[in-house]
Amino acid sequence: MRPLSLAERRIAEPTVSLGRMLAGTRPVVEGQTSLTVADYVDEIVGSGFPGTRAMSWRSREAVLDSYLDRIVEHDFPELDRVVRHPTRLRQWMTAYAAASSTAASYESIRDAATGGHGDKPAKSTTQPYREILERLWVVEPVPAWLPSRNHFRRLTAAPKHRLCDPALSARLLGVDREALLDLSPVVTPRARDTTLSGQLFESLVWLSVASYAQAARARVRHLRTRAGEREIDLVVERADQRVVAIKVKLSTTVDDADVRHLRWLQDQLGPDLLDAVVVTTGADAYRRRDGIAVVPAALLGP
């Protein structure tokens, strides 16, 4: 079981069904929400663990920190992996959190964990970190989409990195809502660090989409060409390899440049692309003239 999806958190009533998109019905896309980027940042740092939802911010942060400590101090030994250097494991987890929503190599994550110093843990040390964290469902990488049909060449096989809850990434990185938002009284609240905020927002959307896809007996992948010319954040795939493609954008608006990779995929797949969606922090759900759906994250449901 994953942490709560946005629909399960009841912050808004979903009006757009991923399940209907996967059914190939190309449903009407409509609905409005008053949620802003500040609300989504609250959900990023607030966690989807049910037991924390009613807690104060300070208590919630303490519980998440304790959970991370327990992983290092208790969960690893219970799986017969003695951690001789707990600080090193914690540094690796922090570097992994910083790589959220990217396909960074494990070597670059290891380098980030050691600050570029020469004394780097061996691959035989860090490989079990990842394997045990996956067994604990703390780390859940998003595999690359590698369709058996010959639609593409030069797709990367590298997974995208995810912790099970973006709130854990935020705690490891030491960032809170104030660190992620510009709360100046003279401007509307907006993302302060758009790179990190965008990565964690994508992780929040993935958490929800993964839950909805599982309910529809579909799986979630990502698509990226080797040189990075084309990238689709989330590819939700049915058993017959027909897909719904999703781009995640930490913004209230969508323009033609934002959908260019979705339109490219549409040209490549034809009818195998069941639907294409841009998930945003905006107020309105609608379809563009080109048929691509624009859906605020809180309005997307199972």
Image (cartoon, rainbow, N blue to C red):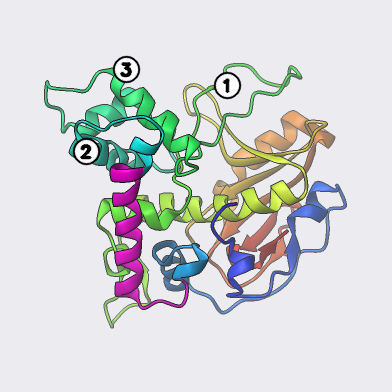
The answer to whether 58 is drawn above or below residue 70 in the figure is below
Prevailing secondary structure of the magenta residues: helix
For residue 124, the mark is 3
* Amino acid carrying mark 1 in the image: Leu
The C terminus lies in quadrant: bottom right
> Helix, strand or loop at disc 2?
helix
Q: Which segment is the magenta one?
A: 53-74
Q: Where residue 245 sits in the image (x, y, percent)?
A: 67, 43
For residue 170, the mark is none
> What residue did someone put label 1 on?
155
Q: Where residue 148 sits in the image (x, y, percent)?
A: 73, 19
> Helix, strand or loop at disc 3?
helix
Q: Where residue 176 sits in the image (x, y, percent)?
A: 30, 65
Q: Residues within 10 Å of mark 3 (few under 14, many from 20)?
A: few
- Residue 193 visible? The answer is no
Q: Residues within 10 Å of mark 2 (few under 14, many from 20)?
A: few
Between discs 1 and 3, the one toward the N terminus: 3
The answer to whether 35 is drawn above or below residue 116 in the figure is below
* Amino acid carrying mark 2 in the image: Pro
* Amino acid carrying mark 3 in the image: Ser
Instruction: Tell me whether the residue at label 2 lies in contact with that at label 3, contact meaning CB atoms closer than 8 angstroms.
Output: no
* Residue at image point 57% right, 61% down: 4
* Residue at image point 18% right, 39% down: 87
